[in-house]
Image (cartoon, grey):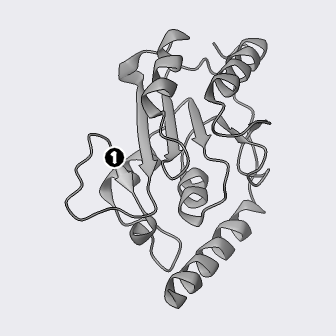
Amino acid sequence: MFLNYLKDFSTKKIVKNSLSNVKHLASDKVIKTVGIIFDESYFYEREALVKELIQNGINESDIKVLVYKDKIKKNEVFDYPIFSHKDLSWTGTVDKKEVKDFIIEPFDLLINYYDTEKVALLLVSHLSKASFKVGFTSIDKRLNHFMINTNAENYKVFMDELFKYLKILNKI
């Protein structure tokens, strides 16, 4: 328990320090590929959110999902990539292959679908090579290019606002 607290503290310090050096580059690319990072601790409507993306013109094959769970049971089986706090190292890196593959994927849009700051989620979002990152206003403002003021339970409101502004920004 205490070691997990120390690991969180050191990783959060690494992420916060590296966020102070972030320079957001403007991207005018049209969105074709989408990555989504979910926190399954609070939000269980993963399929509904993906369906919203498909209804708004994103191909299902161009959507990749990465799910964070606080605790993964030993015999639990998933049909999507999943990671937890145990996949973090003390030096602020991720050791799991699926997470590393997700991070290096150059998405046109990364949706950070979590409204509670957890070190593992912040780290993966920060390390992602996505050109345009969207998230909630309750998360560190330096992490995302665009923030929507709602909570994670209102995924319809989030998606409506997201696509409204993506149209205004000529990204879709």
Q: Position of residue 44 (x, y in %)?
A: 47, 40
Spot the residue most to the left. Answer: 75
Task: Please give the name of the residue rendered at 63% of the width and 80% of the height, measured from the top-left corner.
Answer: 9
Q: Position of residue 125 (x, y in %)?
A: 58, 51
Task: Please give the name of the residue rendered at 66% of the width and 31% of the height, measured from the top-left corner.
Answer: 154
Please determine whether, in this image, residue 163 is positioned above or below residue 18.
above
Task: Please give the name of the residue rendered at 47% of the width and 15% of the height, measured from the top-left corner.
Answer: 54
Q: Nearer the viewer, residue 122 or 1?
A: 1
Task: Please give the name of the residue rendered at 33% of the width and 51% of the height, measured from the top-left corner.
Answer: 98
Q: Nearer the viewer, residue 7 or 26?
A: 7
Characterize the local packing of mark 1: few (<14), some (14-19) or many (20 or more) Cα atoms within 10 angstroms: some
Please determine whether, in this image, residue 7 is positioned above or below residue 124.
below
Q: Which residue is mark 1?
A: 81
Total marks in image: 1
Q: Position of residue 75 (x, y in %)?
A: 19, 60
Please determine whether, in this image, residue 91 is positioned above or below residue 41.
below
Left/right placement of residue 69 relative to residue 79 reads right
| Image quadrant where residue 123 sits | bottom right
Assign the C terminus to one quadrant of the image: top right
What secondary structure is found at the residue carrying circle 1?
loop
Q: Position of residue 21 (x, y in %)?
A: 76, 61
Q: Nearer the viewer, residue 103 or 121?
A: 121
Which amino acid is tagged 1?
A: Pro
